[in-house]
Amino acid sequence: MQQLIESDPFADALEQFYETGSAHLDLLRDDGYHNIEDVGWYFTTFPDFWTIEKAALKFARGRVLDAGCGAGRMALYLQRKGLRVTAVDSSPRVAALASARGVRDVRVASACERLPFKRAEFETVILFGNNLGICGSRAGLEKMLREFARVTNKSARILATTRAPGMFNPKHRAYWAQRLKRGQAFGVVRLRLKFGMSEREIDWFWIAPAALMELAWQCGWRVAEIFGDGRAEDGYAVMLEKR
């Protein structure tokens, strides 16, 4: 029986941008909200990083794990700064692209599963591009934080970006109210990624700073610093430290 190949619109879009310098990814929320993302963002260099990313990056040290590395923008920057970086991505094609762009140590692995590393291998974990919510739920985030606790040393820190479930933009406020009315998990965003004929549905998890403080503490981490004001439209960066 022929094995079906799973669609990977994110990889499709990254590969097209890498080859042509132009690509856009359609993001369709389950309430009909539609956003078109310029994939060039995943290839940015330090001058074009978000302000909150630049602020958080100052705290990167030791051996670094870049979880959900995408095209490798963060791994490449930290390599140039002299840090030893191991980058992981769940997509073999995305991992291959990051390697082709010069990331020295790239593995195919998911931050939402058990990672192929020993205890205390890393001192810093990077989760940029709102990747704190990459596992799609509160339970998924909890599992990921506990796994990072396993593979990091006693002085470890996590540098991450995320968004708070928004009450400022009326379109987003209505979405969260609708989810609450239906009894659906608050903070979970269901998205359909579309690039050409390729589509995939994913869940992403957003979490407000106060809720993150509580969850992180339960998983052996503490919120040491917040960068940004936590508004859903802007997002925020956070530094977690082992407690």
Image (cartoon, grey):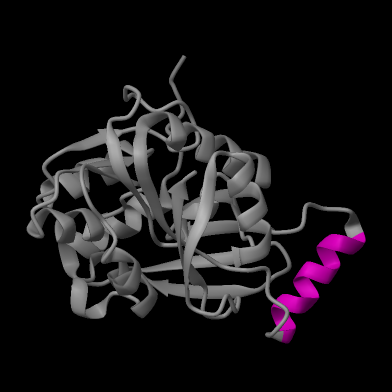
Q: Nearer the viewer, residue 2 or 53?
A: 53
Residue 114 placement (x, y as % from top left): 45, 26
Q: Residue at x 69, y 70 (%)?
A: 32
Q: Is residue 219 above or below residue 179?
A: above
Numbered-mark total: 0
180 inside magenta stretch? yes
- Magenta stretch, residue numbers: 170-181
Q: Locate residue 119, reporting x and y percent.
A: 35, 24
Visible residue check, residue 7: yes
On screen, residue 32 versus residue 55, left or right, reads right
Residue 78, x across and y down, in percent:
17, 57
Picture quarter containing residue 34? bottom right
Q: Which one is in front, 2 or 122?
A: 122
Q: Position of residue 87 (x, y in %)?
A: 26, 43
Q: Residue at x 89, y 57 (%)?
A: 182
Q: Nearer the viewer, residue 210 or 189?
A: 210
User: Is the residue 57 above or below the residue 214 in the image?
Assistant: below
* Relative to 136, residue 171 above or below: below
Q: Give the left or right position of residue 20, taking residue 169 as reference.
A: left
- Is 239 displayed left or right of 14 in the figure? right
Taking the image as drawn, is residue 136 in sight? no
In the rendered image of this protein, does residue 198 appear above or below residue 90?
Answer: below
Q: Residue furthest top?
A: 1
| Magenta region includes residue 117 | no
| Residue at x 38%, y 38% (from the top left corner) | 90
* Most frequent secondary structure within the magenta stretch: helix
